[in-house]
Amino acid sequence: MSIETLYDKDGDINALQGRTVAVIGYGSQGHAHAQNLRDSGVNVIVANRRESDNGKLAIEHGFDPLPVDEAVKQAGEGGLIIVTLPDEVQPDVYSASIGPNLKAGMTLGCTHGFNIHFKTITPPEDVDVVMVAPKGPGHTVRSEFERGGGVPCLLAVEQNKSGQAFETAMAWAIGVGGGKGGILKTNFKDECETDLFGEQTVLCGGLSELIKAGFEVLTEAGYPPELAYFEVCHELKLIIDLIIRGGLSYMRYSISNTAEFGDYHTGPKIIDDATKQRMREALTDIQTGKFAETFRGDFAKDFQWFKAQREKDHAHPVEQVGKELRRMMPWLKPVEI
Ligand code: NDP
Ligand code: MG
């Protein structure tokens, strides 16, 4: 491994003893951090709107959700404030309810470096600032913990006023189960920029456009949309599962020779140097903060552009035919948005 990887033995959950952890938000990440830490013996309080679905869930799970400012005040001296609100919401909630209640010696914790790295949240100098970012969705962070394991986490320290920021972050990471899977030591910049790059160019942006383009080429050439859907979307699951288990080599070992030959023959013509150059440009936009600025600008306009894109792609034929076909495959547990 090229980066330092830590486990349970490298830290001590007791670094959180006698302290209060306030988990702000009870969504995907929030519910997992709050419950795992509580099950690890840590004193946890939760902030969320009581009447929303997440608020009700927190109550069902035995928490007593507080307003954000109240939770930060109650965490008090030595408190660790874990912010698990949507990234675009964090700056406003921070300015109104978190920042004004942070006292010297407290720790501000995030599960993604976005707002700290792009300075849309600037914590006071007398607090510690750390990150524990599980590399999985919240429900997996919870279910793996319940199974006795844990999802690997990235850990970073941005500000170490107390001299104990790393110990605090390790205790948090261990408390959510990360010490079983592995805690990879990194920094806010690397976590944030690689995360944005991955989701934009490969995982979400790249893949969605690849699916749409493949579907359009086949249907524009007169092939039935049902066949196009199976070939450019449905079968992805099979391929991804193989890659995740054993890399590209295992995927290629499992597919036919015809498919593997075609992979080497045609793949590089689709994703070529020009694609890579555009990926570099996307990375530059991320590094310079241009993407973050665009994101915030649209949020300030009530996500006008964002919502229009969502609507447009929702109406794409691949989505329409996909919905019909998934109804024929109940074992996929189809979901309609
Ligand atoms: P969710 O959308 O699942 O949850 C957001 C929470 O914030 C909800 O409890 C919601 O409460 C609350 N909330 C939303 N808007 C407001 C508001 N205006 N004021 C007060 N509370 C509000 O978020 P995620 O868990 O997905 O993301 C949280 C953080 O974790 C982000 O920084 C994200 O980047 C990071 N992260 C997410 C991962 C994931 O897999 N989802 C993985 C790793 C990191 P309510 O129900 O009342 O609206
Ligand atoms: Mg991501």
Image: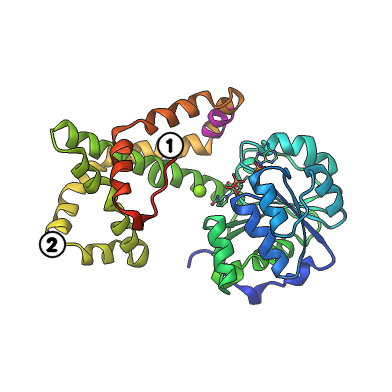
Q: Residue 219, how many percent across, how many down? A: 18, 34
Q: Residue 60, how many percent across, how many down? A: 69, 57
Seen at 71% across and 34% down, the residue is 92
Residue marked by disc 2: 257
Residue marked by disc 1: 282
Seen at 67% across and 43% down, the residue is 52
Q: Which label lies toward us, 2 or 1? A: 2
Considering depth in this image, is 281 or 251 the residue closer to the camera?
A: 251
- Which region of the structure is painted magenta? 291-296
Q: Are marks 2 and 1 in contact (CB under 8 Å)?
A: no
What is the CA distance from the residue labelled 2 to the residue labelled 1?
Answer: 35 Å
* Amino acid on which disc 1 is placed: Ala
Q: Does the rendering let one see residue 130?
A: no
**Magenta stretch contains residue 292:** yes
Quadrant for the C terminus, please: top left
Q: Is residue 200 left or right of residue 145?
A: left
| Label ID, residue 19 | none
Q: Residue 47, how many percent across, how many down? A: 75, 48
**Ligand 2 closer than 8 Å to the CB at disc 2?**
no
Seen at 53% across and 28% down, the residue is 294
Which colour style is shown?
rainbow
Q: Residue 228, how many percent across, how many down? A: 21, 42
* Amino acid on which disc 2 is placed: Asn
**Magenta stretch contains residue 176:** no
Dot 1, crowdedness within 10 Å: few (<14), some or many (≥20)?
Answer: some
> Circle 2 — which element?
helix
Considering depth in this image, is 61 or 302 the residue closer to the camera?
A: 61
Instruction: Relative to 34, say whether 204 is above or below.
Output: above
Q: Does the rendering let one see residue 313?
A: yes
Seen at 38% across and 32% down, the residue is 313
Dot 2, crowdedness within 10 Å: few (<14), some or many (≥20)?
Answer: few
